[in-house]
Amino acid sequence: MTGKLSAYRVYLIYAGLTAFLFEMVFTVNEIYRIEVAGFNAFELVLVGTALELSSFLFEIPTGILADTKSRKLSVIIGLFLIGLGFLIEGLVPLFLVILLCQILWGIGYTFTSGADEAWIADEMGGKDLSRLFLRGAQVKQFGALLAIIVSVLIGTVMINLPMIIGGALFLALAVFMILFMPETAFQPAPSEERDSFRQMIHTFKSGLQSIRKKQFLMVMTGIVFFYGLFSEGLDRLWIAHLLEVGLPDINIKPVVWVGIINGIAMVTSIIAVEYIKRKLEKTGKLQKVWLLIAINSAMVLSIIGFGLAGNFTMAFSAYLTFYILRITNGPIYRAWLNENIESKVRATVLSTYGQIDALGQILSGPIIGFVALKFGLGLSIVTSGLILAPVVLLYVYLLRRV
């Protein structure tokens, strides 16, 4: 039995709270692993790889439940697993436990991924979804920004407290969804569509076949793969590198600096994306490619500068620049990519690209972690920047071919 809240309101509450709780945990979890659990560089990357691998392996299989039994049930199971993963990690600072927690909440995330949007699309009857998802994106941005402030304030008292509170609130959100999440329009998938493993293989093969037919899509496959390769190590090691470079000799804890970087980057990127979106509304594909070349070139230089930085000011400035560029790059890249994929194969190609990106992250994580362990964090960061460099060359190659 559900309460009286409409599906629209429940979705916005869900979107805002999940964004808030994820950001609350992510603001402190890397610092917690370094300062409390005592992780080295390789361990930091390894837990990230475990998360990516579990998400990759379970993304399609968990769709069985959402498509054949209940989207609501899938979301609720996912929230419980995510909450348990964060809660246990915050309470037990041991490598093996934290590794298992990544697998646990990674599987949980796959239960919610896709099921939440499929649920609300069903409940809304497929109508007015653009307005709903736009409003949802705004709520998520506000929730994430608020979470940074809250997490920093709580984290300065006890660094693992935001993780414990975040995990507990995910469990509370699961209970809320049990009570208030309506499911009135769900239609189970036909039996012939229920073999998720076969579907996954078929989708991947179909995607590759579509990609091979067009040179643009072949080149984009390389770009997507390099995006996956460069990101995993950098995302797991940037805080460790910033701490190694050394924080200013003032009474400000590391979690505050992380909050400052995340907060400034988020606000700046929101403004930048809105400005660029308005500018691009009247431009063509050529200008977008030039913009992607410029942004990605600057990303490569800022990552390498971050890796070579010898003091906090240089490291802080370089990483902040990269972060803003990266968030700005995302929507421009996705919009341009979608423009150049035929509608009839778009979903299949994008799904295949998602798998290729994940493979890149899984493959590169342990390698970058090994480089950091043997040769230092700075060199591992520089390596991540060099791995991204081919993306710029591939965009230049595409410049006259789209």
Image (cartoon, rainbow, N blue to C red):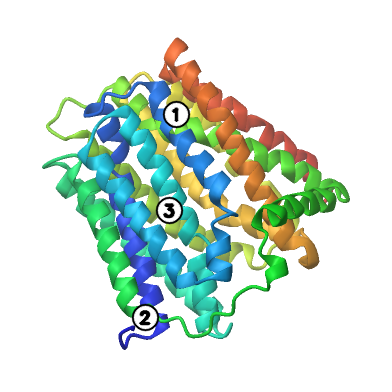
Q: Quadrant of the N terminus?
A: bottom left
Residue 40, position as x, y percentages in the image: 35, 21
Circles 2 and 1, Cβ within 8 Å, touching? The answer is no
Task: Name the secondary structure under disc 2.
Answer: helix
Disc 3 or 2, which lies upstream in sequence? 2
Q: CA distance from mark 1 to mark 3?
A: 19 Å
Q: CA distance from mark 3 to mark 2?
A: 23 Å
Q: CA distance from mark 2 to mark 1?
A: 38 Å
Q: Residue at x 30, y 47 (%)?
A: 86
Find disc 1 in the rendering and name its residue: 46
Task: Name the secondary structure under disc 3.
Answer: helix
Front residue of 37/292: it is 37
Front residue of 184/14: it is 184
Residue placed furthest toward the right: 213
Q: Is residue 235 visible?
A: yes
Residue 178, position as x, y percentages in the image: 33, 73
Find disc 2 in the rendering and name its residue: 9
In terms of image quadrants, where is residue 389? top right
Find disc 3 in the rendering and name its residue: 108
In terms of image quadrants, where is residue 350? bottom right
Front residue of 3/311: it is 3
Residue type, label 2:
Arg
Q: Residue at x 34, y 46 (%)?
A: 262
Residue type, label 1:
Leu
